[in-house]
C-alpha cells in the first residue's frame, strides 16, 4: 500500500457553557496566560530599564583650559604655584602666580571618516631651573556630541592630575576619552546640553568658584562625566643645567574610540522586549498544557461530545 | 479504560516527585530561613521560623503520604477526575518547591504551596476515603 495523500482531521469537542469541560478548558488557558506573565515578570528583566549602543562621538577642542603647576623652589626651599587659564577671570585673581604657556593642539583623523580620532595637546611652560615642578593639575575642555539615538552636545572637561615623586620636566598622558554616566541618558527629540557651563560667558564667577577645588567638584557632581580611561602616563625628571631655556611640558594624547552609550529605552522598545518574553513563556507552557488538554478530552476523562468530521465514513 | 494506562503511572510519579522535593527542603531549610530574616537577627526568631517551616513540611509529608495511601490502597485509583486533579496539583507543587529551593524563597512560600497544591487534594482524598466506607466504592469499574 502507498500513502497517496495525507491531511489532518479537525475533531471538535463540544460541551454546554455551564459544564466541567468548558470550565476545565477555560481554566487551563487562563492559567497559562497568568502563569506565563508571572514567570516572565518574576524572573526579572521584563521591563527593560536601560540599554546601550555604540557610537563614535564627534569631539572638538574648545580652547578652554586651566593649568596649575606645583613644586618647591630649590633655592628658597619654599613651595610655589604657577597657574594659567584661558578664562580671564581666573587669571585676574591669580595675577601674582601667572605663567603663560605655549599651547599647541593637533587633531588627527586616522581612518579618514571625517570624525576626529585623536587629539595631541601640548602646553609648554617656561620655568627657571630652581622651580622644581612636582605636581600638575589641569582641566582641558572639549565639546562632545552624540547624534545617533541619544542627542547630546555637552562640554567634556578632561581632568588631569599627576604627582611626580621627584621634580620633573615633562608629563605625558595618553588615554581614551570615555563617557561615564551616573544615570542612563533619556532618548529625547531635543539635544541635551550642559545647563551650567564650567566657564560661563554670560556671568562673572565669584573668587571661590574659580579655584581648582570648586571646578573639579562641579565636574564630579555632574551626571555626564568624562574620564581618560584607560590612561597611561610618564614623568620625565629634570635635566640639570638647562638655564636659561628651561621648560615644563605637559603632553596629552586623547584618543576618541567608539563609545558605549547607556540610554533609557523608549516605550516601543520596552514593550517589544516584554511582549517577546511573555510570548516565549506562553509557548513553553502550551508545549505541556495543549497535549494535556488533548489527553483529557480525547479519553473522555471530562465528558464532552466529540464531533468527528469523518464519522459517516468511519466503520468501527 | 485506556486512559488509566497513562493516568495511574503519571499520578504515582507526580506524588513521589513532590514527596522527594519536599524532603529535599529539609537539607536546605537554613537558607530559606536566613533569607526571610533581617540582616541582624536573634536566635529566638530563627528558631520560631524554623519550627514554623518544620510544621509546614511535616504537614506536606502527611498530606502527600495520605494521598499516596489512598491511591495505592485503591480508594481513588480509578477516579479519573480526582487523579487528574492530583497530577496537576502535585506537579505544580513539585515545580514550585524545587524553584523555592533553587532560588531560596521566603519560608512562608511553603505554607502557600501547602495551602494550594497539597492540602486541597488531601481533603478530597479524605472525603473519598470516608465516602468509600459509608457509600461503597467510588471507583469507575
Image: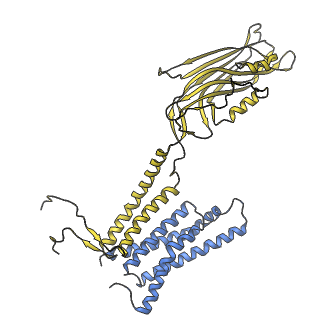
Residue pictured at 40% horizontal, 74% vertical: B84
Relative to A60, does residue A277 appear above or below in the rendering? below
* Nearer to the camera, A97 or A197: A197
* Nearer to the camera, A41 or A240: A41
Q: Which percent across, then down, holds residue A118?
A: 56, 22
Which residue is farthest right? Answer: A76
Residue pictured at 51% horizontal, 72% vertical: B116
Relative to A114, does residue A181 appear above or below in the rendering? below
Is residue B49 left or right of A54 when viewed as pictured?
right
Q: Which percent across, then down, holds residue A180?
A: 61, 35
Q: In which quarter of the image is residue A287?
A: bottom left
Relative to B63, does residue A211 appear above or below in the rendering? above
Residue A250 showing in the rendered view: yes
Is residue A64 left or right of A47 when viewed as pictured?
right
Of the chain colours in the picture, the one used for chain B is: blue
Which residue is farthest top? Answer: A244
Residue pictured at 46% horizontal, 62% vertical: A34
Q: In which quarter of the image is residue A74?
A: top right
Q: Which percent across, then down, holds residue A250?
A: 68, 19
Q: In which quarter of the image is the C terminus of chain A?
A: bottom left
Q: In which quarter of the image is the N terminus of chain A?
A: bottom left
* Nearer to the camera, A161 or A98: A98
Which residue is farthest left? Answer: A1
Which residue is farthest front? Answer: A202
Residue A167 showing in the rendered view: no
Relative to B104, does residue A61 appear above or below in the rendering? above
Provide the letter of the chain coloured yellow: A
Residue pictured at 54% horizontal, 39% vertical: A263
> By what rule are the colours in the image chosen?
by chain
Q: Which percent across, then down, holds residue B129?
A: 45, 86
Amino acid at each position: 500500500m502507498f500513502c497517496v495523500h495525507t491531511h489532518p482531521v479537525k475533531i471538535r469537542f463540544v460541551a454546554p457553557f455551564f459544564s466541567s469541560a468548558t470550565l476545565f478548558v477555560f481554566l487551563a488557558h487562563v492559567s497559562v496566560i497568568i502563569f506565563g506573565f508571572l514567570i516572565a515578570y518574576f524572573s526579572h528583566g521584563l521591563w527593560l530599564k536601560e540599554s546601550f549602543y555604540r557610537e563614535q562621538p564627534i569631539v572638538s577642542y574648545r580652547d578652554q583650559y586651566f593649568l596649575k603647576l606645583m613644586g618647591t623652589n630649590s633655592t628658597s626651599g619654599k613651595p610655589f604655584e604657577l597657574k594659567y587659564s584661558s578664562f580671564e577671570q581666573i587669571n585676574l585673581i591669580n595675577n601674582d602666580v601667572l605663567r603663560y604657556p605655549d599651547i599647541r593642539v593637533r587633531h588627527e583623523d586616522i581612518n579618514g571618516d571625517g570624525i576626529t580620532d585623536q587629539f595631541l595637546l601640548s602646553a609648554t611652560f617656561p620655568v627657571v631651573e630652581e622651580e622644581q615642578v612636582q605636581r600638575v593639575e589641569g582641566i582641558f575642555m572639549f565639546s562632545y556630541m552624540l547624534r545617533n539615538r541619544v542627542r547630546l552636545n555637552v562640554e567634556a572637561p578632561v581632568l588631569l592630575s599627576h604627582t611626580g615623586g621627584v621634580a620633573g620636566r615633562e608629563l605625558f598622558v595618553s588615554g581614551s576619552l570615555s563617557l561615564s554616566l551616573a544615570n542612563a541618558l533619556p532618548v529625547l527629540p531635543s539635544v541635551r546640553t550642559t545647563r551650567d557651563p564650567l566657564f560661563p560667558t554670560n556671568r562673572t564667577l565669584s573668587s571661590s568658584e574659580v579655584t581648582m577645588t570648586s571646578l573639579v567638584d562641579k565636574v564630579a557632581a555632574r551626571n555626564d562625566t568624562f574620564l581618560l580611561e584607560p590612561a597611561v602616563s610618564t614623568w620625565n625628571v629634570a635635566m640639570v643645567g638647562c638655564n636659561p631655556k628651561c621648560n615644563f611640558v605637559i603632553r596629552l594624547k586623547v584618543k576618541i574610540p567608539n563609545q558605549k552609550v547607556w540610554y533609557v529605552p523608549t516605550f516601543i522598545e520596552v514593550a517589544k522586549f516584554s511582549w517577546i518574553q511573555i510570548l516565549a513563556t506562553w509557548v513553553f507552557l502550551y508545549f505541556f498544557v495543549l497535549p494535556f488538554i488533548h489527553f483529557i478530552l480525547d479519553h473522555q476523562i471530562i465528558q464532552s461530545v466529540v464531533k468527528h468530521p469523518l464519522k459517516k465514513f468511519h466503520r468501527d | 479504560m485506556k486512559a488509566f494506562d497513562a493516568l495511574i503511572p503519571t499520578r504515582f510519579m507526580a506524588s513521589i516527585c513532590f514527596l522527594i522535593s519536599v524532603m529535599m527542603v529539609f537539607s536546605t531549610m537554613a537558607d530559606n530561613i536566613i533569607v526571610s530574616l533581617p540582616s541582624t537577627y536573634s536566635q529566638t526568631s530563627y528558631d520560631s521560623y524554623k519550627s514554623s517551616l518544620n510544621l509546614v513540611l511535616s504537614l506536606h509529608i502527611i498530606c502527600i503520604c495520605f494521598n499516596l495511601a489512598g491511591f495505592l490502597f485503591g480508594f481513588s485509583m480509578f477516579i479519573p477526575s480526582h487523579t487528574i486533579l492530583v497530577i496537576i496539583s502535585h506537579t505544580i507543587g513539585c515545580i514550585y518547591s524545587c524553584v523555592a529551593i533553587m532560588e531560596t524563597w521566603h519560608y512562608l512560600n511553603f505554607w502557600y504551596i501547602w495551602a494550594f497544591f497539597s492540602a486541597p487534594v488531601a481533603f478530597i482524598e479524605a472525603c473519598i476515603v470516608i465516602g468509600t466506607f459509608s457509600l461503597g466504592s467510588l471507583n469507575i469499574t
